[in-house]
Amino acid sequence: MDKHLQSTLHEDRIFPPSDDFSARARIKSRKELDALRAKAEADHEGFWAGLARKELDWQTDFTQTLDESHAPHYQWFSDGKLNISYNCLDRHLAAHGDKTALIFEGEQGDTRHISYRELHREVCLFANGLKSLGVAAGDRVILYMPMTPEAVIAMQACARIGATHSVVFGGFSAESLKDRIENAGAKVVITADGGHRGGKVVALKAATDDALSRGCESLEKVVVLKRAGNAVTLQDDRDVWWHDLIEGQDETCEPLWVDAEHPLFLLYTSGSTGKPKGVQHASAGYLLNAITTMKWVFDIRHDDIFWCTADVGWITGHTYVAYGPLAVGATQIIYEGAPSVPDMGRFWKVCQDHKATIFYTAPTAIRALMKAGDDIPANYDLSSLRLLGSVGEPINPEAWMWYHRVIGGERCPIVDTWWQTETGAHMIAPIPGAVTTKPGSCTLPLPGIAIDIVDPDGQPISEPNQGGVLVIKKPWPSMIRTVWGDDQRYYDTYWGMFDGKYYVAGDNARRDEDGYYWIMGRIDDVLNISGHRLGTMEVESALVAHPQVAEAAVVGRPHAIKGESIFAFVVLKGERSADGIDEDLTRELRDWVAQQIGPIAKPDDIRYADNLPKTRSGKIMRRLLRTIAAGEEITQDTSTLENEAILQQLQGKT
Ligand code: 7RM
């Protein structure tokens, strides 16, 4: 069997930054970037200590940069004190109090502009409201909210008083909400009557009531924002309207100075077992990497209009909506709803109407918008855009090219950012004014981030294009601190594979001859065809490169001779046959893949469907597809799927 993961896909297109972009960028050349990287390599702690003092406002300076005495529970700047909300709001007021912080657009078209001064006021009022409910430093507060400014206000208010928030995505069920409230031992839930999503009202308060009726012993109070105006029932002793809570509160609220390591938030990821896994982040280190990446990767400037489309229920919505843009004093767009309301032009209309300059979204959205055709974006003026970003999954080169050509007008650099809930901020990404991009590669590790690729024995793989396990070799400020209440699970999941030596991300990757990183897929999804180990990404990208294919997912299916054969699920740009089978096209696609990357990667089976099973944040769930490909009944939990109904179709039942 191959020791290394085999790579078969070759991509020769390259896109150097334009002189114009580089001239105005914060980091202007590869030389400048390499110097920064060399500085970090020469003195890892000194590099981060310098940035921590430059980029953060401290109430008490720190004397120790990195404390390794509890490794792998690393601590950064641990005897320093600061407040995260102060760093996001107060410090901008004197010079930029009237600058717009948030441009909000609801799904139904309502808009609001909120300045830094107004946001600060709202955060103070609400923080005082939380205090009046008895919320104190270290208490856990759950947010189960629509994507409105109040979600950001509530997160910032928690940070202001040292409460640890945990946002549960509004699309999750009452049962998942209950599990998270119980695991966190939360005292308060902040929710809304409802939110607008996909043309419907999502009844958040009703789901909260349902969750609380199933247990949640620790829960004392529920705060309810009036948003959608749908009918709700308030329980007298437990529930309070947001507007009643802030009524008469003081408009100032002194920030509570907390330790650098104070738990800022928990964010639950579903994990492979049923029990939710609460990724715990700290304060100072987290905000530091949020800030450095806003500057390095998004090249954020005073006059930018930044739009990250992620919901605050995901890490992307924490780092690049609730914290990063505010910490650097930027103006950002928040959109409440779905990209398809009223039609697939909504994102482009929002970009046009609010003059977005930086747009950051996920490959799943890019592929869906690409499937809708070029005519739709052509109806909008996208000339304000200067930089595009991608996050969440490998972006297939064809989707990258479409994004570049149709959305970016061949003018905007694309930053393909690799990172995780656990890493807190971008780890591998191009610096747009300095790094030549290649479609499908997240390019180079950021300064101060020690990435490597190792074989199953933990030996670094130095030959180019040999796939292996992606690891991070040195601690970094915004790293996960633990799994809430389960240090053993923290160790087992992220450090166990190489006995605590490296942080293991769970992805496979290769590095090409220029040192560029290419993510090949999750370790658990590797295909094993006659002893050749292949990642999912390359076969999928070869399929997506076919003019008729919009999206593809491949999995291994048990095979008597080869061990595994490749089973591909394909979404076409146009119509598909009713039974999901199309022999002519299948023959063509098999030949196409053989031609693009070699006969070894030829799918034995191809099934056509209207969509793929995805998590709520848009990642393809290959685990379920493996069960379907093997012809087995699905016994896994499918409630975290965004589109549960698609399973019937994928099984060939509709
Ligand atoms: C930010 C986020 C993390 C996993 C990660 C990868 C995949 C994310 C990229 C990517 C290829 C990218 N956090 N992933 N970004 N794969 N290229 N640019 O998504 O915790 O929800 O997921 O997502 O597998 O390990 S996450």
Image (tube, rainbow, N blue to C red):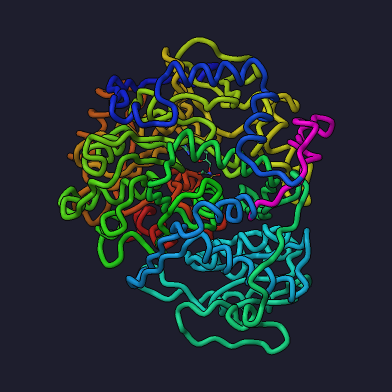
Residue at 31 percent across and 46 percent down: it is 367
**Vertical comparison of 367 with 111: above or below:** above
Q: Is residue 26 magenta?
A: no
- Taking the view exactly as shown, the residue that stands out farthest to the top is 463
> Could you tell me residue 591's position as x and y percent?
23, 28
Q: Main secondary structure of the magenta part?
A: loop
**Vertical comparison of 233 with 631: above or below:** below
Q: Is 631 left, or right, of 470 in this rendering?
A: left
Residue at 55 percent across and 56 percent down: it is 93
> Could you tell me residue 569's position as x and y percent?
35, 44
Quadrant of the rendered structure where residue 40 is?
top right
70, 268: nearer the viewer: 70
> Could you tell me residue 518's position as x and y percent?
44, 26
Q: Is residue 183 visible?
A: no
Please report the bounds of the magenta region as a residue range: 60-85
Residue at 74 percent across and 47 percent down: it is 59
**Vertical comparison of 274 with 68: above or below:** below
**Vertical comparison of 646 with 446: above or below:** below
Q: Is residue 77 magenta?
A: yes
Quadrant of the rendered structure where residue 414 is?
top left
189, 492: nearer the viewer: 189
610, 394: nearer the viewer: 394
- Taking the view exactly as shown, the residue that stands out farthest to the right is 69
Residue at 27 percent across and 67 percent down: it is 342
Q: Is residue 571 visible?
A: yes
Q: Is 92 left, or right, of 16 in this rendering?
A: right
